Image: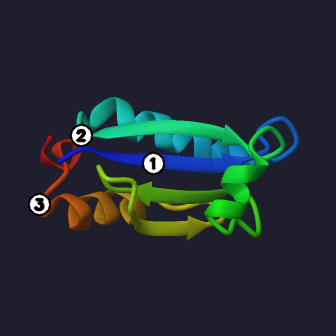
Amino acid sequence: MSISLFCRCRPLFCAPCRSTRTLLAHISADEPRVRHVDVDVADHLELVRAFNVLSTPTTVLLGPAGQELGRAVGVPRKDQVMAAISAATGGSPAAAQR
């Protein structure tokens, strides 16, 4: 199962957004089933509305069919993201097995 982590943020103006982007990029580099996509809210207002993003950073975990599997508002901790990936994929993330 492949999943995606989408981070809605304003990286140029938001320090927590930059921290979140860095964390998610590292996780996706270590976890082959995860793809990280960083979205600037100013450039994609249609996605902000579609996913009901009310603050930044907001991270949305999406399944292979685009269904929302989880969400974090604010800067998530690595263990929170890894637990959400594990729950979404039905097992331990590859990065957690190392």
Neighbourhood count class around disc 2 (C-alpha, 10 Å): few under 14, some 14–19, many 20 upward: some
Neighbourhood count class around disc 1 (C-alpha, 10 Å): few under 14, some 14–19, many 20 upward: many
Q: Is residue 16 visible?
A: no
The label shown at residue 5 is 1
Q: Amino acid at mark 1?
A: Leu
Question: Helix, strand or loop at disc 1?
Answer: strand
In percent of width and height, residue 95 lies at 22, 42
Q: For the point 72% across and 48% down, which residue is it?
A: 9
Side of 45 where 92 appears, left or right: left
Q: Amino acid at mark 2?
A: Arg
In percent of width and height, residue 33 lies at 24, 40
Per the image, the residue denoted by label 3 is 91
State whether residue 98 is above or below residue 77. Answer: above
Per the image, the residue denoted by label 2 is 33
Q: Earlier in the sequence, mark 3 or mark 2?
A: 2
Side of 85 where 37 appears, left or right: right
